[in-house]
Image (cartoon, rainbow, N blue to C red):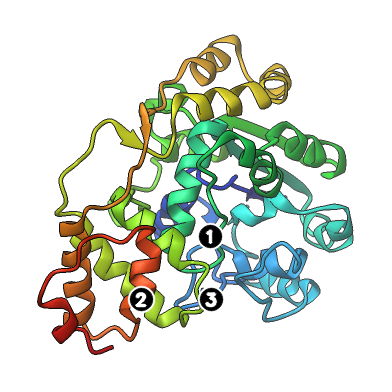
Amino acid sequence: MQHLYLHIGTNKTATSLIQAACRHQRGLLQQSGIDYPATGLGQSPNGSVSVGHHDLAAAISPSQVRNFRASQSIESLRDALLRETAHYPKVLLSSETLSYIGHRDMPRLRVLLDAFPKVTVIAYIRRQDSFALSGYNQKIKSAYNQNKFPKSLPNFEPYCKKTKMDFYRKMRFWDQHGGNAELVVRPFVETAWKEGNILADLFAIIDPDMAPPRSDKAQRNESWPLAAIHILQRLDAMDIPHKDRRELARVIRQVAERFSVRPDEGFLTPDIQRYLLERYRKSNRLLATRFWTREETHLFEEQEVKTYPKSYSGITAGEYAEIIAAVWKNGIPVSESRISSAVGHNPARPEWEGSMWRL
């Protein structure tokens, strides 16, 4: 009897790491009777093949999976999936975008779920303050599909609605509409995981006796310097081609990593953290009551997420000059006026700047 394990994220819970580890070590999984199939893997906007099953997710929920377009119908993907995995008792699929599906997607979701005699849906939940900070950083550096991260409390209401951080509501949807599927929800807290490792924790659900895949070849989403995030957020509103924006992001990050660290400045202030925790307190407690032990709930609620006394104050004139020089040196076709607008103020212009800037 074939058993489908459907890993649905959620976002910002090491999904890239999990997917890359499974994709790169597919042979190891197959030795334990688990297949992480090629069917349903998506193609990202830059043309590379995704390590997650985002093509499959796009076929189920085209309105939610906006960065991928399904290559086939869900029925065709289902048939191809069953052919590819026919010799394996367990099938693992992973796409964090599946956590966003809605009622309109249910007929297509059922096409997938009904193809397997047994289904387990697995989700990890990250606390909202940590989720918002990590999500903002990732959206900026991805060079497409950004949400603006508000810097003041009055602007947080629309941001919260757009980012859909009511995770209990998401899990309740799967609980109610997943049919006979078992729903397993885990806290995204290292101290709550088996061996303090998310891959070990995940595969303890799938096959407790196997050694989990290693993450040494997996993708990791590292944090970027504040100066780079600050500039790229402002550039997001400007009409810059995707290719140029990615190259611009790369150059700005390289330069910003040389800037002096400001330990008392950041995007997540104590006021914003308190707002997020209070807003989602009831949702989180309902989630914990339904899915977690008392110890797991304690670890989720008491985890430390770094905050900063002050919001980021912006780059200096010297830092601005370094960025302008690097953009010019790399030949990126973005005008100085756009960089200046992105900085948000008018730092002193170095004497050489007018003669060197030709783009």
Residue at image coords 65%, 65%: 86
The residue at which mark 1 appears reads as 36
Q: Position of residue 296 (x, y in %)?
A: 54, 17
Q: Is residue 62 left or right of residue 155?
A: right
Q: CA distance from mark 1 to mark 3?
A: 16 Å
- Label 3 secondary element: loop
Specify the quadrant of the image occupied by residue 251. bottom left
Looking at the rendering, in which quadrant would you find the C terminus?
bottom left
Mark 2 surroundings within 10 Å by alpha-carbon count, few (fewer than 14), some (14 through 19), many (20 or more): few
| Most foreground residue, 299 or 83 | 299
Whether residues under marks 2 and 1 lie with C-beta atoms below 8 angstroms apart, the answer is no
| Most foreground residue, 241 or 60 | 241
Q: Can residue 115 be seen here?
A: yes
**269 is higher (above) or lower (below) than 132:** above
Q: Is residue 354 left or right of residue 81?
A: left
Q: Position of residue 281 (x, y in %)?
A: 66, 20
Q: Is residue 16 left or right of residue 261?
A: right
Specify the quadrant of the image occupied by residue 190. top left
| Most foreground residue, 80 or 31 | 80
Mark 3 surroundings within 10 Å by alpha-carbon count, few (fewer than 14), some (14 through 19), many (20 or more): many
Q: Amino acid at mark 3?
A: Gln
Q: Amino acid at mark 2?
A: Ser
The residue at which mark 3 appears reads as 43
The residue at which mark 2 appears reads as 337
Whether residues under marks 3 and 2 lie with C-beta atoms below 8 angstroms apart, the answer is no
Q: Amino acid at mark 1?
A: Tyr
Q: Position of residue 114 (x, y in %)?
A: 83, 56
Q: Nearer the viewer, mark 1 or mark 3?
A: 3
